[in-house]
Image (cartoon, grey):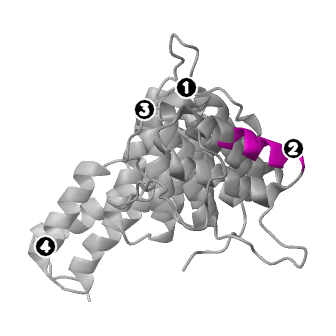
């Protein structure tokens, strides 16, 4: 079941506000071309049969002309006269009857634009996607991507009815942003859109997936300003998870290692103070985890050998902690043959 949109975080609003229509690399013909890929960290996996199938001839869409060019003129005339439903069927008929004709790409683009003008945004997005999938080399790729982004952005911020009901699940909206990135994974605005995707994940409390998106951004676009934001946001998610699951030592260690690495990588990070605060909190948590583990062996299991090993490990790693003197004293007692504590 699709989840409902709850709270879209401040980061979403910032990220969306800055995304513009600059996209993938421009060819010598002046067109923008995408570089499709299926795998992006933190994105939903694509099914093997997820490619949009080509439209087939249908009884419901019959042509009114002998050639694609003539059919295109008929469809455009109907649209000009405001006969939108009839125009849509005429465009569809052309696409299905002559799918390889140059006019088919024109008709597909016109169909998507017509749906967009009518406010049928979800359907329009899908028709633009069909255009990219089947006519990528015969359409204004950059403009189509820009239109897809505007639609996804609109759906993100206009997702409630006049009665306050949620219209679409956040999964559906997020998947549209993911599709845009897949359409142009090297696009200039892919990092910004990935920030939006990560923030939607955060708003749905899907923190591991958000971390994957942010760290994917860091790895793919390490020199961008968005990478700086992603480092902070990933650290925030990792800190929250480590504190929430305070019993999970590996998760805590991973969070500490990530924040340390991020601060080495970006020593003058704008949020360095906050990230350092998180690092100190997590270090204190790790110390507490290891101390309590040693005490558990000493007092609960009453296993002297296990307790001594745990105390030694503690002193090796946390020799300057506030527990260090207490641990040294207890270890000395155990090494002299003292019984485990009750």
In this figure, which residue is indicated by the disc labeled 1? 224
Residue 219 versus residue 203 in the image, above or below: above
**Which residue is at a point 55% across and 32% down the rendered structure image?**
102
Q: How many marks?
A: 4
Q: Foreground residue, 192 or 243? A: 192
Q: Nearer the viewer, mark 1 or mark 4?
A: 1
For residue 90, side relative to residue 223 (left or right): right
Disc 3 is placed on an element classified as loop
Q: Nearer the viewer, mark 4 or mark 2?
A: 2
Disc 2 is placed on an element classified as helix
Image quadrant where one finds the C terminus: bottom left
**Which residue is at a point 54% across and 17% down the rendered structure image?**
26
Q: Which mark is residue 35?
A: 3
In this figure, which residue is indicated by the disc labeled 4? 306
Residue 205 lies in quadrant: bottom right
Q: Position of residue 135 (x, y in %)?
A: 50, 37
**What is the CA distance from the residue labelled 1 to the residue labelled 2?**
45 Å
**What is the CA distance from the residue labelled 3 to the residue labelled 1?**
19 Å
Mark 1 or mark 2: whose residue is earlier in sequence: 2
Q: Nearer the viewer, mark 3 or mark 1?
A: 3
Q: Work out which residue is located at the far front of the displayed protein and give it.
A: 66
């Amino acid at each position: 079941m699709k989840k409902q949109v709850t709270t879209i975080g401040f980061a979403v609003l910032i990220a969306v506000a800055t995304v513009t229509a600059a996209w993938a690399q421009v060819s010598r013909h002046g067109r923008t071309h995408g570089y499709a890929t299926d795998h992006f960290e933190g994105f939903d996996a694509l099914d093997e049969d997820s490619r949009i199938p080509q439209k087939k001839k249908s009884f419901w869409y019959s042509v009114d002309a002998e050639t694609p060019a003539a059919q295109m003129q008929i469809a455009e005339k109907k649209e000009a006269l405001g006969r939108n439903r009839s125009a849509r069927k005429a465009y569809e008929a052309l696409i299905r009857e002559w799918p390889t004709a140059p006019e088919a790409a024109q008709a597909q683009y016109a169909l998507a634009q017509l749906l967009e003008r009518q406010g049928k945004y979800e359907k329009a997005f899908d028709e633009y996607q069909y255009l990219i999938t089947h006519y990528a080399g015969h359409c204004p790729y950059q403009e189509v991507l820009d239109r897809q982004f505007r639609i996804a952005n609109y759906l993100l911020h206009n997702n409630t009815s006049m009665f306050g009901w949620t219209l679409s699940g956040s999964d559906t909206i997020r998947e549209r942003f993911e599709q845009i990135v897949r359409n142009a994974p090297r696009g200039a605005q892919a990092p910004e859109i990935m920030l939006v995707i990560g923030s939607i994940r955060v708003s749905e409390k899907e923190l591991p997936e958000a971390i994957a998106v942010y760290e994917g951004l860091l790895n793919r676009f390490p020199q961008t300003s968005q990478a700086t934001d992603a480092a902070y946001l990933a650290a925030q998610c990792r800190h929250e998870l480590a504190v929430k699951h305070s019993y999970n030592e590996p998760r805590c260690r991973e969070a500490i290692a990530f924040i340390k690495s991020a601060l080495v990588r970006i020593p003058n990070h704008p949020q360095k103070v906050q990230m350092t605060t998180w690092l100190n909190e997590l270090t204190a948590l790790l110390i507490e985890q290891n101390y309590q583990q040693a005490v558990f062996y000493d007092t609960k299991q009453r296993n002297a050998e296990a307790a001594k090993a745990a105390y030694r490990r503690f002193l090796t790693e946390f020799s300057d902690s506030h527990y260090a003197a207490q641990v040294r004293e207890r270890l000395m007692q155990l090494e002299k043959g003292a019984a485990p504590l009750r």
